[in-house]
Amino acid sequence: MSDKKTIKGGEFLITETESKDIFIPEQYDEEQNMIAQSCLDFLETEIYPELEEIDAMQEGLMASKLTKAGELGLCGISVPEELGGFGKNFVTSMLTAEVTGAGYSFAVALSAHTGIGTLPILYYGTDAQKQEFIPKLASGEWKGCYCLTEPSSGSDANSGKTKAIPTADGEHYIINGQKMWITNGGFAHVLTVFAKIEDDKDLSAFILTADMAGITMNPEEKKLGIKGSSTRQIFFNDVKISKDNLLGKRQEGFKIALNILNIGRAKLAGAALGASKAAVSRSIQFANEREQFGRSISKYGAIRFKLAEQAIKCFATESALYRLSQNITDTIEAHEAAGMDKQEATLEGLREYAAECALLKVHGSETLDYVVDEGVQIYGGMGYSAEADMERAYRDARINRIFEGTNEINRMLTVDIILKRAMKGELNILEPAMKVAEQLMEIPDFDFDDSADYAAERRVIGNFKKAVLLTAGAAAKTLAASLAKEQEVLMNIADMVMETYICESMLLRVEKMKSMGLNFELQEKMMQTYLYDAADRMHKHGKDAVNSFVTGDEQMGMLMGIKRFTKHGPLNVKENRQAIAQKMVAENKYCF
């Protein structure tokens, strides 16, 4: 029996995690590595040679690529074997999302199909619905899409106006309305459609098929990026469906939408990570080939800074992402062991870590934005040319900060979830927050024992947690019910929470690598450099938040506390980045 301890969602703020209790990518087993290689081979043979044709929306091409992906099993990684899938755990499905995430528009089509296109039916469908739809979605024979957004309801999804009216005999519904930004809309056979039944307060969900009378579409949207991804407006004009097409219970649609988005957010971080790593490798290869002033530009410090920073951000996202993925996997398995149905156990596991899913979506998408932006800079003029591959990566990246909930919404959601759990007594952060506030009146103890491995780093991260608790606790106490309207303060706190989780995840990964006897020296430099920079960001976010809602002596006391809890010793970050970049330049790829 494993003695591994899995913390609950949000609990990382008040509990110290041991490195033995987390999963790191260096622990992939042989099967996981084989699946990752199959995904990479698919991109190399099926996607990269036809990127221009995919982006030009060549008729039937994207759908045919999804069919081929399905034949290889890539559409059914997390679908149970009895429904035609591979039945793999969340870590393995995350690894698949990561590797295929480097597939530009194809990555969007695949993730939409396997995620929001399939999972609502898998997790909320009746046995009959699952038997009818899931095997064909898992095989790639049918493609799926998810119809939630409307012209007047984006982030406020529950305000949608699409209506479902029961017929007089109660055997059917008549659906009327409009949906927009529907990924895979142009070729999907199965549509999960959200609508309000009569004058219900909350949405319900329905399963429709594209051949039903009354479904029409606008032409494909012209977009900044992901040009090969089918994006349509879909209209429902007196579409008559059986009552058996209701998915889940009446008015359960909003809950379905939110729970499926939890999965989507985590998987989006994985896809963004895969795209980021690929872009780093291309940046390195270009920097090695491009010569200026008689030498490769990869030999210059300004370029090496960029390459190293790209790698540090990727390593940061990855460390947190697989820590989270294993926590979700462990929680799902614990619920199953207690007798819970597999699908319900999965939803409970994801619900438990909704805050972490939201913050990883933010971090992953912003890592990708940084990586491709600096990639264009490293390419110089060629970065702006459609002849080179970085231009497409740059355009395609931008959507990730918008879909699956904007990064602003996800930041506020992270804090909202944690505070609501605290108020319900599910997460004891109020008591530790009060203790931190009391510490402000005490004389700080500077007698540190730094003889243990990473004692200084652990202390810095412990202080980050205190900074979060101090700021969030004071905001909740001072602003009370009005805190929900103070979006700037919420986003400051969210960034502090995110930096804390990322830093701790990096430290735990490096500790575990060291304990496993692996080469860890450069990863240690990445962790230490990120932590050093994060301290300044933590100070800025904490200071900005405090100055927004506290005045007088209390303000001065809290600002001193924030400064104290975000202190970091000196570090030669130039030397660290040089070492990180030199390794990648020698390997000619992202090699961590």
Image (cartoon, rainbow, N blue to C red):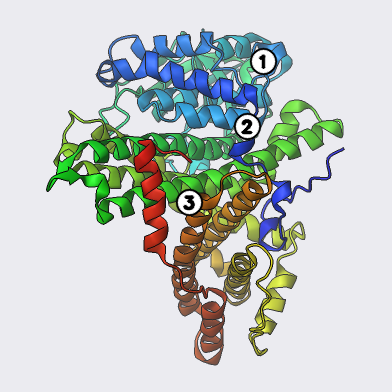
Q: Position of residue 43 (x, y in %)?
A: 41, 20
Relative vertical location of residue 19 with respect to residue 55 in this rendering, above or below: below
In the image, 485 versus 10, the foreground residue is 10
Q: Is residue 169 visible?
A: no
Amino acid type assigned to the residue bearing label 1 in the image: Lys
In the image, 226 versus 33, the foreground residue is 33
Q: Earlier in the sequence, mark 3 or mark 1?
A: 1
What residue lies at 51% left-to-right and 82% top-to-bottom?
559
1 vs 101, left or right, is: right
Q: Give the CA separation, mark 2 to mark 3.
A: 33 Å
332 vs 184, left or right, is: right
Q: Which residue matches tag 3? A: 409
Crowding near pointer 3: few (<14 within 10 Å), some, many (20+)? Answer: some
Amino acid type assigned to the residue bearing label 2 in the image: Tyr
Q: Is residue 192 visible?
A: yes
Amino acid type assigned to the residue bearing label 3 in the image: Ile
Of the 4 image quadrants, the one containing the N terminus is top right
Q: Position of residue 431 (x, y in %)?
A: 74, 72
> Residue 28 got which mark?
2
Q: Which residue matches tag 1? A: 130
Relative vertical location of residue 528 with respect to residue 276 in this rendering, above or below: below
